[in-house]
Image (tube, helix red, strand yellow):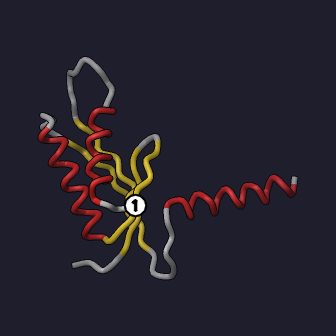
Amino acid sequence: MTKLTCLADVCLIPAQIGTPTASVSTYVTAVVDVVRKSGLHYVLHSAGTTIEGPWDEVMGVLGRAHEVVHEMGVVRIQSDIRVGTRTDKKQTPEDKVESVLSKLEKLDNKQ
């Protein structure tokens, strides 16, 4: 059991070779539903989802997301996962974005 809390930025990519459409929104919806039902904090963005929580729970949700997409008939899935951990403070995905926006505002005020 891992005691770390993490932020995982995740993008599941169903390998749908030869399908009539490039759209993956149906699969994204199914994955976000898995994340939502997990009770973990998450932020959906244009190219993936950031999930916040205990390491083992986040990894369990990612495994369940793969299972659900496979159950939808996708035989191959590739996932891009970037996981960050900190031990000095708790930081949400929104905190990280706010930090950058705040610094941008200070830059704008100097110009």
Query: Is the residue 86 above or below the residue 58 in the image?
Result: below
In the rendered image, which quarter is residue 58 located in?
A: bottom left
Residue 14 pos. (x, y %)? 24, 37
| Badge 1 element | strand
Q: From the image, tell me which residue sits under label 1.
A: 41
Q: Amino acid at mark 1?
A: His
**Count of numbered circles in the view:** 1
Q: Give 4 or 30, whichever is nearer the viewer.
A: 30
Q: Residue at x 32, y 71 (%)?
A: 54
Residue that lies at the very extreme toward the top in this rendered image: 20
Name the image quarter holding the N terminus. bottom left
Q: Residues within 10 Å of mark 1 (few under 14, many from 20)?
A: some
Query: Residue at the spot x=76%, y=55% of the render?
Result: 105
Q: Residue at x 28, y 45 (%)?
A: 31
Q: Taking 44 as reference, is 41 above or below it?
A: below
Question: Which residue sits at x=32%, y=53%?
Answer: 36
Residue 56 in percent (x, y) is at 25, 70
**Residue 80 versus residue 57 in the image, above or below:** above
Q: Is residue 97 left or right of residue 12?
A: right
Q: Residue furthest right?
A: 111
Q: Name the image quarter holding residue 41.
A: bottom left
- Looking at the image, residue 69 sits to the left or right of residue 81; the answer is left
